[in-house]
Amino acid sequence: MAQTITTKEPLNVTRLATGRYLDTGIVAAYTFSDLGFKPRYVKVQNLAATGATIEWYEGMDDASAWKSVVAGDGTLITTLGITVSDRGFIFGLDLDANVTSEQVSWIALG
């Protein structure tokens, strides 16, 4: 059995950014473009009833993510997930995680 393994050399310094927000208006995609680095991993967690988690790993397509909710199994989504840029990321309009009046926390590692 053949295996293909892709790795990158570890960075000498890991960059880390965290945040939290609460939307009280119309639900929209959120842009966090001032982190100052290109994330290699992003996790967004809805802290309310749905408990939805969205995770993006380096190498995944734009707008995709691994999504899990409290009441179910995880699934790979290919739209409305996370899109990474050179200085941050966009958290898409996934309606399980990005919900009006529900607090969301996030972490990005670069």
Image: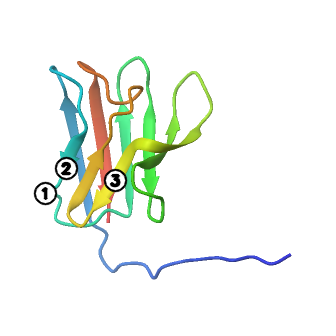
Q: Which quadrant of the rendered structure holds the C terminus?
A: bottom left
Return the x and y of residue 65 as percentages of the image width and height: 47, 47
Closer mark to the observer between disc 3 and disc 2: 3
Residue 61, percent from left and from top: 45, 58
**What's the distance in space between the residues labelled 1 and 3, CA to CA?**
14 Å
**Residue at screen point 19% across, 22% down:** 26
- Where residue 10 appears, as percent x and y from the top left, is 42, 78
Tag 3: Cα neighbours inside 10 Å, few (<14), some, or many (≥20)? many
Task: Of the two numbered discs 1 and 3 on the same chain, state the one appearing first in sequence.
Answer: 1
What residue type is disc 2 on? Phe
Q: In terms of secondary structure, where does tag 3 sit?
A: strand
How far apart, in angstroms, are the residues tagged by discs 2 and 1?
6 Å
User: Which is nearer the eye, 14 or 64?
Assistant: 64
In the current view of this chain or complex, which residue is farthest to the right? Answer: 1
Q: Callout 3, which amino acid?
A: Thr
Amino acid carrying mark 1 in the image: Asp
According to the picture, the residue beneath numbered tag 1 turns out to be: 34
- Mark 3 to mark 2 CA distance (whole Å): 10 Å
Q: Which residue is mark 3?
A: 83
Q: Is residue 29 above or below residue 50?
A: below
Quick one: which residue is furthest to the front in this view?
A: 79
Residue 17: image quadrant is bottom left
Quadrant in the rendering for residue 96: top left
Q: Badges 2 and 1: C-beta atoms under 8 Å apart?
A: yes
The structure residue drawn at horizontal position 16% and vertical position 20%, both measured from the top left corner, is 24
Q: Secondary structure at mark 1?
A: loop
Instruction: Look at the numbered discs 1 and 3 and tell me whether their residues touch, using CB distance below 8 Å.
Output: no
Q: Which of 13 and 32 lies nearest the eye of the viewer?
A: 32
Q: For mark 2, what is the residue?
A: 32
